[in-house]
Image (tube, grey):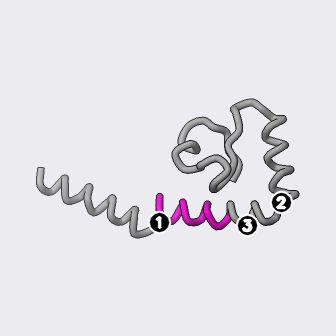
Amino acid sequence: VIASNFGGAVDIIKDNENGFLFPVDDDKILSEKILTLLRNQELLLRFQFKARETVVNYAGFEKVVGMYDNCYKELLTS
């Protein structure tokens, strides 16, 4: 994952851990990040694994169902 360091992306992507963040409107750094992943298969595979792990933990089925369950319980008790 490569995303600008703006908005919700910074909550999910940890730079150099599960993807790359780059400054908004900095095409040069964006292209450098793309080339880095194209040239480094090991890093790409590590990012893929970590990104999937992050999504499962952040927005996996059980997590989302649990959030809805808590929301409904709060609504019913108020």
Rendering quarter of residue 41: bottom right
Name which residue lies at 15% across and 57% down.
76
Identity of the residue drawn at 36% across and 65% down: 65
Dividing the image into 4 quarters, which one contains the N terminus? bottom right
Q: Identity of the amino acid at label 1?
A: Gly
Secondary structure, mark 3, is helix
Residue 37 occupies quadrant:
bottom right
- Quadrant in the picture for residue 50: bottom right
Q: Residue at x 61, y 60 (%)?
A: 51
Helix, strand or loop for the magenta stretch, by majority: helix
Residue at which label 3 appears: 45
Viewer-side label of 3, 1: 3
How many residues crowd around disc 1 within 10 Å: few (fewer than 14), some, or many (20 or more)? Answer: some
Magenta segment, which residues? 48-59
Report which residue position mark 1 lands on.
60
Q: Earlier in the sequence, mark 1 or mark 2?
A: 2
Marks 3/2 in contact by CB < 8 Å: the verdict is no
Work out whether 4 lies above or below 13.
Answer: above
- Mark found first going from the N terminus, 3 or 2: 2
Instruction: Name the mark nearer the viewer: 1 or 2.
Output: 2
Q: Is residue 32 left or right of residue 17?
A: right
Residue 13 located left or right of residue 21: left
Q: Earlier in the sequence, mark 3 or mark 1?
A: 3
Q: Which mark is residue 40?
A: 2
Alpha carbons under labels 3 and 1: distance apart: 20 Å
Residue 43's spot in the image, x, y percent? 75, 61
